[in-house]
Amino acid sequence: MLSLHNTKCECGHQNAVGTVLCESCGKPLIEDAAEETPLEMRYDGVARRSQKSNPNPIDRIWNFFSSVKIAVYLILLTLIAASLGTIYPQESSFLNNFEPDTYYKEEYGTLGHIYYLLGLSHTFESWWFIMLLVMIGTSLVICSLDRVLPLYRALSKQQVRKHLRFILRQKTVYEAQIDVPAEQWVEQIGAQLQKKRYRIHSDGTALLAEKNRFSRWGPYINHIGLIVFLLAILARGIPGWQMDSYVTIPDGDTVHIDGTNYFVKNEKFTVTYYTDEELPEKLQGKARAKLYETKAVLYKCSAECGDGLNETPVLTEVYKHDIKVNSPLQYDGLKLYQFDYDVTPKLKSVNPMLIDKQTGEAYGPFELPMKDPALDYDLGPYHLKLVANYMEFSVNDSGEPVTLGREPNAPAFVFLITGPGLPEKGQPYMYFPMQKDKEKFGQDTLNAAIADKFEIKVDGMENVHFAEASTYLNVRIDKALPYVWVGAAISMIGLLMGSYWQHRRIWLRIDDGKLSLGAHTNKNWYGMRADVAAALRSQGISIDPKSLDNGGNNA
């Protein structure tokens, strides 16, 4: 830390504590043993807040985040964390429901289980990963402010006539006696430099030539772009701003897109296969999809949009599109991509009847869809209330009923039957629409005594309805994506500004016929020396550009 207490330079300018070079005349304010070495011109020697000698707690936080070393460490930690998050698939990448605590162990063994326990299976949504991004953003902001404000102050206060020690301790220096009147010589060399697109500022026998100052702001514009980029990434955590999920829609069904106010209908799914004549010999005899598409209709719910199963939402058609691979349905930021399909017939609905075994009376039939069934059914003197619905029924190790997925591969329904001859609170009845499931799980055994009184069954295959095919759609919403591109574009502009242009300055003064010239650039010293040598050559002074070097870094 610097502990300077300078107040005024000999030129009369008041400098802030910590200033290395006078903001006005450029005189070095630190006495050092290496008087002949080139000056440190970073930020033109202006003091930065992070250099305060007696920092308070806020200053210490500022100093922490203003450190480039800390910024590099944060970026490395984030890269390592992001790499760890790609070892195994993230939880958000899976289609349909699955149990992550068992999946990673069964699929990847002990390492997979440890991966899940460490929380790496949802790395990019974790609080610690988001915190790393926030810290990187904070570091970018503070690093920029700590440097750009002093730099702006230094460049906006440049004086034409600089102190001799400032000029002669630049990395490119030239001294000589001249015979031409001083002001005339300054005017002539200024005209030559102007041809090289330098902006000329003169003060009698002193001159400042400068070009490409804008390039000094390139790194900070790059930082602004990165900050916009990070904010856009973090904005994806705002509800409704980002979605990447999947929906399964049997032919003719309309399903709700979770987390939105939209419904999508699969009017018809079709798949076309290559013929053997269209395939190479080694692939012949195998089914290869040539084209698969979903004739989709997008609806927006305008009323009764709650989650209650008895509510029938009021839908308004907003868009229709035939979804194909690489041709998604796009509407108001919502995109539906063709992801996969299943041409295996799926049970869609049944129309069973309630049979009173004691009287032989049959009540019904009533419509029972596999998805989103109604909660209540009135059948003659009896009432059926749906209390549980399993799409893929199974029994876990604890003997409790569970569902293994969202598709009706083994559907089961639990009804509470009330009516004559039954307890006031009703009696439960488990119904399996598919015969194989009735036998596998023992429907009559599960229902016990009530199985002797009632039976729910389907009379004829005309009361069983299948969906011939199902389409899988990938649902995406990314409102932050335009801001990601804006941030990337801003960052690229800053990168180009700082990479392809260099800020070049030439100071000179003539005192009693003696020329003192110094030049500085933030990069490409070969070009800087060439400009100076060319300007001197136009005044009849032939000099080797390499001889202008004052011990600086000539990279």
Image: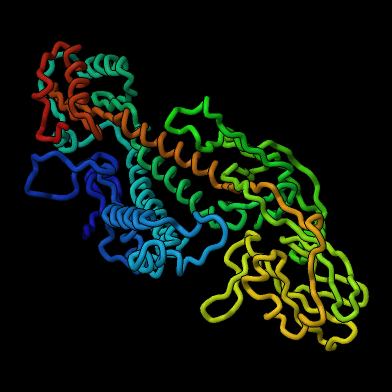
Q: Position of residue 420 (x, y in %)?
A: 90, 84
Q: Is residue 260 above or below residue 308?
A: above
Q: Nearer the viewer, residue 280 or 162?
A: 280
The image quadrant of residue 528 is: top left
Q: Residue at x 35, y 40 (%)?
A: 219
Q: Nearer the viewer, residue 180 or 547?
A: 547
Image quarter hosting the N terminus: bottom left
Instruction: Locate residue 522 relative to residue 356 in the image: left or right.
Output: left
Q: Residue at x 45, y 69 (%)?
A: 102
Q: Residue at x 30, y 65 (%)?
A: 55
Q: Position of residue 300 (x, y in %)?
A: 76, 49
Which residue extends farthest left?
33
In this figure, what is the number of numbered marks? Answer: 0
Instruction: Locate residue 472 relative to residue 41 in the image: left or right.
Output: right
The image quadrant of residue 293 is: top right
The image quadrant of residue 336 is: top right
Q: Is residue 476 visible?
A: no
Which residue extends farthest bottom?
423
Q: Position of residue 111 (x, y in %)?
A: 33, 65
Q: Nearer the viewer, residue 187 or 137?
A: 137
Instruction: Locate residue 30 relative to residue 504 in the image: left or right.
Output: left
Q: Residue at x 22, y 48 (%)?
A: 20
Q: Is residue 496 visible?
A: yes
